[in-house]
Image (spheres, grey):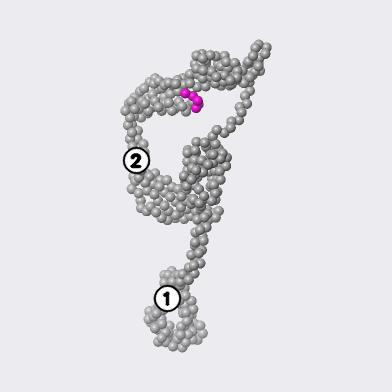
Amino acid sequence: MKNQWIEFFNGTVTVKAKGKGCERFINNITREGLNIWNVKRYGPEAVVFNMRLQDIKVLRGIVRKSECKVEFLKRDGAPFLMKRLLKNSGFLIGAIAFLSIIILLSNVVWGIEIKGAKPATEYQIRKELDKMGVKIGSVQFFIDDVESIQRKLTNNIEELTWVGVELQGTTFHFQVVEKNQPKQPELLTPRNLVAKKEAVIVNLFVEKGQPVVKVHDFVQKGQLLVSGLMGKEGQMEVVASKAEVLGETWYKTYVELPLNSTFSVYSGKEKRKHAILIGDWSIPIWGFGDHQFAKYKEEVNVKKIKFMKWELPIAYVHKTIREREDVTRSYSKEEAIGIAREMARNDIKKQLSEEAIIKDDKILQRVFDNGKVKLTVHFQIIENIAEGQPIVQGDE
């Protein structure tokens, strides 16, 4: 046959003809235009051949006019296969249902383990996970990826310094590091406290040691503030000085800001697509057609489908395409000065400790050049200027 696939879909039968005049019977078949193949003789009065299922009705008419009897030995092809499948449909449906249930259960969250958190913090974490849909019985396809869960927990729960998230099989594992952990007692060796920069003393809070400066004194960098030598002459005691010395310090910073700037924002329009990925072959299941966005950003979330503990070469793909627009923002000169001044304050804050206070700021210079405002800003800061300096033998 030139095209066995076509015959397979149409169906074929293997026929055995027995009786006198088999050759004449075969000639009558071909004379009627029926297509037969694999013709073989079995003994002096029998012949076996293959023919198409759709020609059986014509064959029966030829048989009635001949002295031969026919017997159907074998049935092949799609029609007979479908009959067998339908006959055994209960078993087939049961097998498909069983595999579907196993795959579904393999992609459901069955455990959430949290380590390193206090009971109160653990309660907050579980409450936040519930809001995100991460709970026992949830299907993993509809849950955020591990990085997103980690980011949301860290941003939404102030008590967390860091949280590690790992998905092992059907269980989420969370390793938590909380803020305000008990600090290890600081072991201090005998030391003086000296100024780490030029300043005017604003206040002193001495816990241990002998202060050698007063409020309103101007001190240079490295100048002694609190001595670790205490007591009278001949009865000196060496201690680890401990104090907070607040001083007024000075900073200068330079910032520039364009009066006109162009940046991209999301317009609010988006298109969502869902697909099943088998190897490199993607089968769309929702969100057909192309988007019409001139500028856009794609976010692709791929969820591997698991069978028991193994990952299958099949994945569920959720793609979000968001439209972006270019927006031009313009500032007046006064607006630009105010925003640049705030930028300068933020830059200074990054250089300071959390306890430091910005007392005042003053614009020393402002220049408008090439579509930009350029500011030089002077800051007065109140901060702790004390740093330790070990007392070495001989300082006494």
* Percent position of residue 190, x then y: 63, 21
Q: Which residues are magenta?
A: 353-357
**Under tag 2, what secondary structure?**
strand
* Percent position of residue 237, x then y: 65, 16
- Along the line of sight, the residue nearer the viewer: 126 or 317: 126
Q: Which residue is mark 2?
A: 325
Mark 2 or mark 1, which has the lower sequence index?
1
Identify the amino acid type marked 1. Leu
* Percent position of residue 377, x then y: 41, 22
Identify the amino acid type marked 2. Glu
- Along the line of sight, the residue nearer the viewer: 346 or 291: 346
Q: Is residue 62 visible?
A: yes
Determine whether 226 is above or below 17 in the image: above
Say which mark, if any, is on residue 85.
Answer: none
Q: CA distance from mark 2 to mark 1?
A: 64 Å
Magenta stretch holds residue 217: no
Is the residue marked by circle 2 packed among few (<14), some (14-19), or many (20+) residues within 10 Å? some
Residue at point 47%, 87% (across, down):
19
Determine whether 26 is above or below 247 in the image: below
Say which mark, if any, is on residue 53.
Answer: 1
